[in-house]
Amino acid sequence: MKKYRLHEIEALLELFSTEPFIFRPAELYKIDGDLKEKLSKYNIYLVARRPRISIQPDSLRLNFNEQTVEGVFSINLGLEIREQAFIYQNMFDAPITALGELDYPYDHLRMILGDSFPVQIRVHDVIRGTGSEIRPYSDLYIEYIGQSFGDDGNSNALNRLIGKTGKQGHGSLQKVLSDINAENPESEVHILLYSFEFYKKVTFGGAGPEPLIPFEDAPERFYQFFDAEVARKNRIDLVEAVLIRYFQPKYNDIYKKTFPKATHEILNTLFELDITGLSTSISTEEHYSRIYSEKVGPSCQHVAMYPILKEMERASFLDLACPMPEIIA
């Protein structure tokens, strides 16, 4: 399709997140205090599964001099239990002086720090402390993507997932949990909570075909773009839609095949500001757990970009930033 260049300068809205918090569903009910307050700004959640990983209790050895714990993971692959050796490096200021006894289902590493301070570390965090050697078994397969601004007025993902009282969880999460328990009993579910507090406005006006409307003919459009604010609720709606379209998880329906579409109301602000590109990035780099889906391969960093246009014949920000030969003046 040949596209025409309407404006000399085109704009893109970039939405990006901090590193996520990752929990198993049962752990959500134990969150309190400062962490619960911090999570009030975490509005996007991904429901994912991976093979059930536990620690072989008789495999643990403490190296006092190196301050490492050596052990073996048991990885449940259904018809096979895979063993994977690991070395966990002490991440605390105090020295490890002893190892604690593990309890079934062996999903925590227990240690004594200093004279008598006990700590326990989730398998997920043990994996973080050992690096990427356990891949691909630590990779997380995305089953569902949701957001916290629901009809019931909840403003953070934690409340939406478990209910304000901890007794009424989100129906989609319960559906995923029940299906995985029935169809993939060797797997366990993890919830990734993301905060998309930050965004950037990007413009591009580089070389290319002559625009139909030069900058000097419509300078107010440029300043309107930079002066405008995109409301947080709108940004969360956009992030959810982009990620659903990008990963196309099994349990999502809306936006999965159609986003972005000119009739989607969540795009109205972008149309009003004449923003012709949308970008969302998401990361799990600090967790040494890649995320993926049936449509997207495993990676610690994902970037999804889509043109935002009412007329498909018009060149978008993405067309100009990555020029295509079919763009015409």
Image (cartoon, grey):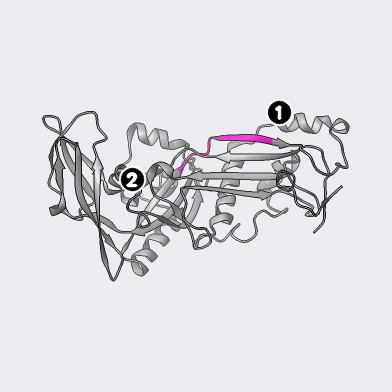
Amino acid under disc 1: Asp
Say which quadrant the N terminus sits in: bottom right
Residue 239 x/y as whole percent: 57, 46
Q: Earlier in the sequence, mark 1 or mark 2?
A: 2
Q: Is residue 125 left or right of residue 164?
A: left
Q: Specify the principal SS of the magenta part.
A: strand
| Residues under numbered marks 1 and 2 in contact, where contact means CB atoms less than 8 Å apart | no
Residue 304 x/y as whole percent: 59, 49
Q: Across the whole image, how many numbered discs are drawn on residues?
A: 2
Q: Residues within 10 Å of mark 1 (few under 14, many from 20)?
A: few
Quarter where residue 165 is shown: top left
Residue 189 x/y as whole percent: 36, 56
Disc 2 target residue? 131
Residue 264: which numbered mark, if any? none
User: Which numbered disc, 1 or 2, marks the residue closer to the eye?
Assistant: 2
**Can the viewer see residue 293 in this picture?**
yes
Q: Residue at x 42, y 37 (%)?
A: 39
Q: Secondary structure at mark 1?
A: helix
